[in-house]
Amino acid sequence: PHLALSEARRTKIGRQGCPDSWASLAGITEASSTGPSFSWPGPLSPLALPRVDSIMLVEEGFSVTSVDASDKMLKYALKERWNRRHEPAFDKWVIEEANWMTLDKDVPQPPGGGFDAVICLGNSFAHLPDCRGDQSEHRLALRNIASMVRSGGLLVIDHRNYDHILSTGCAPPGKNIYKNDLTKDITTSVLTVNNKAHMVTLDYTVQVPGAGQDGSPGLSKFRLSYYPHCLASFTELLRAAFGGRCQHSVLGDFKPYQPGQAYIPCYFIHVLKRTD
């Protein structure tokens, strides 16, 4: 089985200070992913959190190709692979520098063409801005991602519940993929352009164990900005990326989602199966 996880952002700008802060936010120090164990073959794997997504899949015996556009993020993954190079699965772990806008050219596909599954989790895709105001870059990136999926293969991609954020001004409480008990505060800001939501900014305050000079917990603050993909519009983008030749389902925090349900999910997870 060939898996691919991808956080190949449009730009190659390193996120200064983000890996350590994000590790605390995501609960990586406990290696405590709360998502289900993967039982299907192959993804194009996000490297933003190599110690969680990619490593979990490599340890489960999948053939994993992980890609990122950030040199800093690649360094973390390459270091992990080197430290465990004596394990056959890690020795075979493929790590590539790639950009969503040129993904079909940057990433070599496995024999036979296409990956069994392509995974892009952790709200990664929302980092890609809409610079032209017409979402043309979003469409191109999704077409490139979809082109990595073999016939019968899967694309698993998620985004925050921006429908709720835009209607209430706040991110839903709760946890999604990563266990985390360290987030102390999230402040939400929404930027509108021509009366249309254009960017959501989340300012995090996170408790960092042992960050104080005396070894006591300290606080770290950082900001992340996203394009607010709503459920209906992102579903249309995904189906268009496959030319309509796909089966599509939506999960809310890894549970079956029904519009209007009482539980408000933090994240929507789209699962698409290529049918051509």
Image (spheres, grey):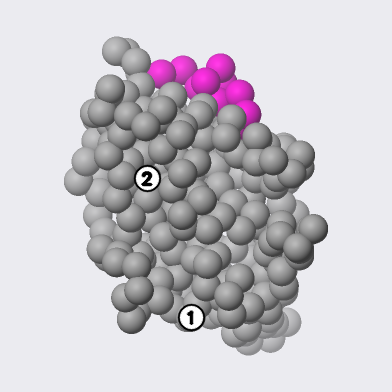
Q: Which residue is mark 1?
A: 173
Which mark is on residue 209?
A: none
Spatial separation of the CA atoms under disc 1 and disc 2? 23 Å
Q: Residue 65 falls in which quadrant of the image?
A: top left
Secondary structure of the residue carrying tag 2 is strand
Q: Would you call the spot at circle 1 few (<14 residues within 10 Å), some (14-19), or many (20 or more)? A: few
Left or right, residue 177 beside residue 249: right
x 40%, y 76%: residue = 264
Of the pair 49 and 143, the residue shown nearer to us:
143
User: Is residue 240 visible from the viewing direction of this image?
Assistant: yes
Residue 144 picture location, percent across and down = 51, 27
Segment tinted magenta in the rendering: 97-109
197 vs 120: above or below = below
Q: Is residue 48 visible?
A: no
Q: Quadrant of residue 248?
A: top left
In the image, what residue type sits under mark 2? Val
Q: Residue at x 55, y 26 (%)?
A: 103
The residue indicated by pointer 2 is: 156
Please indicate whether residue 15 sits to the left or right of residue 242 in the image: right
Residue 120 in the image: x percent, y percent? 45, 45
195 to 52, vertically: above or below: below
